[in-house]
C-alpha cells in the first residue's frame, strides 16, 4: 500500500478506537504507521532511516519481521515510557498506528508474515481477485473511505461525541446544558439558545442566546449580549423558565483560577488588583454589613447577597460590586476566574 493509505487507515483507526481528535496523537499514529516499511530501502521510511533499512533488507524478506505481531509487541513495550511520563494516548496511538501500518498490507496480494518467526503469510481475503494492488483503484477507494471516516470521527469528537450530540439534539433542557457545561466548560465555550419566559417580568423569550459561565445541578447561569446574567432552569431561583434549551459548543478556551484571601482593606482597594474581566465567587466579612442595601432579586441573576452575616459573591464582576465599594473587608476568601474569551473592559 501507499504511505498515505497507511497513514489514513492508522489515524482513522486511532481516532475511532481512542475517541480522540488530538493532532499530536493522530500525528504520532501516522508516523508509526510508516515504521513497518523500514525493512525496505525503497520506502520513504527506509530512505530516512537508510542504515537500519539496509541492514533489515539484507537479513529479512520484505513484509516479514517488521510486519508482525512480534514487532508490534516490541514497539509497544519500547514506547511504554511515553505513557508513564508524557501521554498514554500518544503511546496508544503509536501502538495502534504501527499495528494498522502493517496489518493493512495483509489485504494486498503478497500479504504479510504476521506470525513471524513463522514464514506463513497472512493474506486477506481468501479470493485472490479481491485482494488489493498497490496504487490500484481498490486502494484509492480504501484511502477515500479512511479519510472520510477520520473527518467524521473528528467532527463528532469535537462536538462532544455521538451520545452528547444526541442529547443536545433531542433533550433540549437546562439539565442537558448543565451536564455538557460540567463536562466541557473548563476548556470550551458553551452556548444555549433559549425559548421560555422571564419569571419576574413574564417577558417572552424566543431563541435568545446566552454564553454559559456556570452550572448548578439542573440549571445554568448564562450571559446575554448585553452582559446581563440569568439563571436558566425550572427551579424556583431561576429567572428564566425555559421550554426549550438548545446547547452548542464554541471555541476552545482557557480558564485561570486564583484563590485569594482579602483582609483589612476596603473593597475598592482590593478590586484594584482584580482584572476587569474576572468572575469573582466567595465570601466577604465586612464591618458595616447591617447598613448595606442589597438589590432585590428581579429579572436578572443576583451576583451577591447577604448570607450568615457575610456577603456571598457568585460569578460577580467588578461593576456588580459598586454598592459595597466603600465597605471595609475584615476577612474573606474568594476565587477569581479569568476566561480567555472574556474581553477586558
Image (spheres, rainbow, N blue to C red):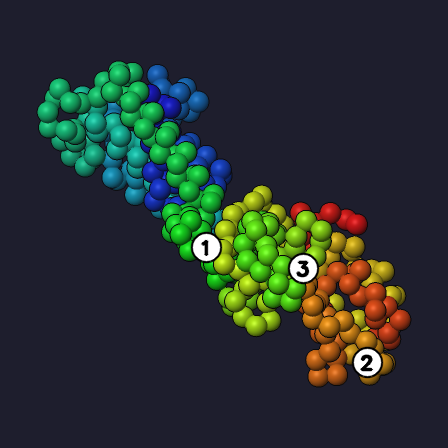
Residue at 15 percent across and 22 percent down: it is 130
Can you give x and y, in whole percent of width and height, for residue 168 in the image? 44, 51
Can you give x and y, in whole percent of width and height, for residue 248 in the image? 51, 48
Per the rendering, the mark at residue 208 is none
- Give how far apart the Cα atoms at labels 3 and 2 are: 24 Å
In this rendering, the answer to whether 344 lies above or below 286 is above
Q: Nearer the viewer, mark 1 or mark 2?
A: 1
Q: Is residue 210 left or right of residue 326?
A: left
Residue at 59 percent across and 56 percent down: it is 204
From the image, tell me which residue sits under label 2.
Answer: 289
From the image, tell me which residue sits under label 3.
Answer: 229
Mark 3 or 2, nearer chain start: 3
- Give how far apart the Cα atoms at labels 1 and 3 are: 20 Å
Q: Is residue 46 visible?
A: no
In this rendering, the answer to whether 253 lies above or below 202 is above
In this rendering, the answer to whether 196 lies above or below 143 is below
Q: Is residue 217 left or right of residue 345?
A: left
What is the quadrant of residue 148 in the picture?
Answer: top left
Residue at 53 percent across and 47 percent down: it is 249
Can you give x and y, in whole percent of width and height, for residue 337 in the image? 69, 59
Q: In terms of depth relative to the viewer, which is nearer, 208 or 182? A: 208
- Give how far apart the Cα atoms at labels 1 and 2 are: 41 Å
Mark 1 or 2, nearer chain start: 1
What is the quadrant of residue 220 in the picture?
Answer: bottom right
In this rendering, the answer to whether 200 lies above or below 209 is below
| Other residues around mark 2 within 10 Å, as few (<14) / some (14–19) / many (≥20) | some
Q: Is residue 146 visible?
A: yes
Q: Nearer the viewer, mark 3 or mark 2?
A: 3
Residue at 79 percent across and 55 percent down: it is 276
Mark 1 or 3, nearer chain start: 1
| Other residues around mark 1 within 10 Å, as few (<14) / some (14–19) / many (≥20) | some
Per the rendering, the mark at residue 172 is 1
Amino acid at each position: 500500500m501507499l504511505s498515505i493509505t497507511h497513514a489514513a487507515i492508522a489515524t482513522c483507526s486511532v481516532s475511532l478506537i481512542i475517541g480522540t481528535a488530538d493532532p499530536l496523537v493522530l500525528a504520532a499514529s501516522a508516523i508509526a504507521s510508516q515504521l513497518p516499511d523500514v525493512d525496505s530501502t525503497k520506502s520513504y521510511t527506509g530512505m530516512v532511516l537508510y542504515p537500519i533499512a539496509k541492514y533489515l533488507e539484507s537479513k529479512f524478506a520484505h513484509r516479514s519481521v517488521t510486519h508482525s505481531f512480534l514487532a508490534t509487541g516490541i514497539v509497544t513495550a519500547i514506547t511504554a515510557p511515553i505513557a508513564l511520563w508524557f501521554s498514554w494516548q500518544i503511546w496508544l496511538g503509536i501502538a495502534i498506528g504501527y499495528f494498522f501500518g502493517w496489518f493493512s498490507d495483509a489485504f494486498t496480494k503478497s500479504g504479510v508474515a504476521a506470525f513471524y518467526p513463522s514464514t506463513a503469510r497472512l493474506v486477506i481475503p481468501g479470493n485472490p481477485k479481491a485482494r488489493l494492488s498497490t496504487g490500484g483503484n481498490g486502494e484509492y477507494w480504501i484511502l477515500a473511505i479512511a479519510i472520510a471516516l477520520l473527518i467524521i470521527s473528528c467532527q463528532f469528537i469535537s462536538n462532544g461525541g455521538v451520545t452528547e450530540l444526541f442529547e443536545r439534539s433531542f433533550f433540549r433542557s437546562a439539565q442537558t446544558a448543565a451536564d455538557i457545561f460540567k463536562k466541557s466548560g473548563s476548556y470550551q465555550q458553551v452556548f444555549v439558545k433559549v425559548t421560555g419566559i422571564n419569571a419576574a417580568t413574564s417577558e417572552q423569550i424566543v431563541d435568545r442566546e446566552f454564553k454559559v459561565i456556570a452550572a448548578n445541578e439542573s440549571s445554568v447561569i448564562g450571559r446575554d449580549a448585553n452582559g446581563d446574567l440569568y439563571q436558566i432552569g425550572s427551579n424556583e431561583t431561576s429567572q428564566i423558565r425555559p421550554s426549550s434549551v438548545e446547547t452548542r459548543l464554541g471555541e476552545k478556551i482557557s480558564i485561570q483560577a486564583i484563590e485569594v484571601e482579602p483582609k483589612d482593606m476596603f473593597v475598592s482597594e482590593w478590586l484594584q488588583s482584580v482584572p476587569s474581566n474576572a468572575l469573582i465567587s466567595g465570601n466577604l466579612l465586612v464591618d458595616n454589613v447591617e447598613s448595606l442595601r442589597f438589590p432585590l432579586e428581579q429579572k436578572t441573576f443576583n451576583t451577591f447577597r447577604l448570607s450568615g452575616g457575610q456577603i456571598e459573591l457568585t460569578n460577580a464582576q467588578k461593576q456588580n460590586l459598586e454598592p459595597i465599594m466603600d465597605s471595609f473587608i475584615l476577612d474573606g476568601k474568594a476565587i477569581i476566574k479569568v476566561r480567555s474569551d472574556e474581553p477586558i473592559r
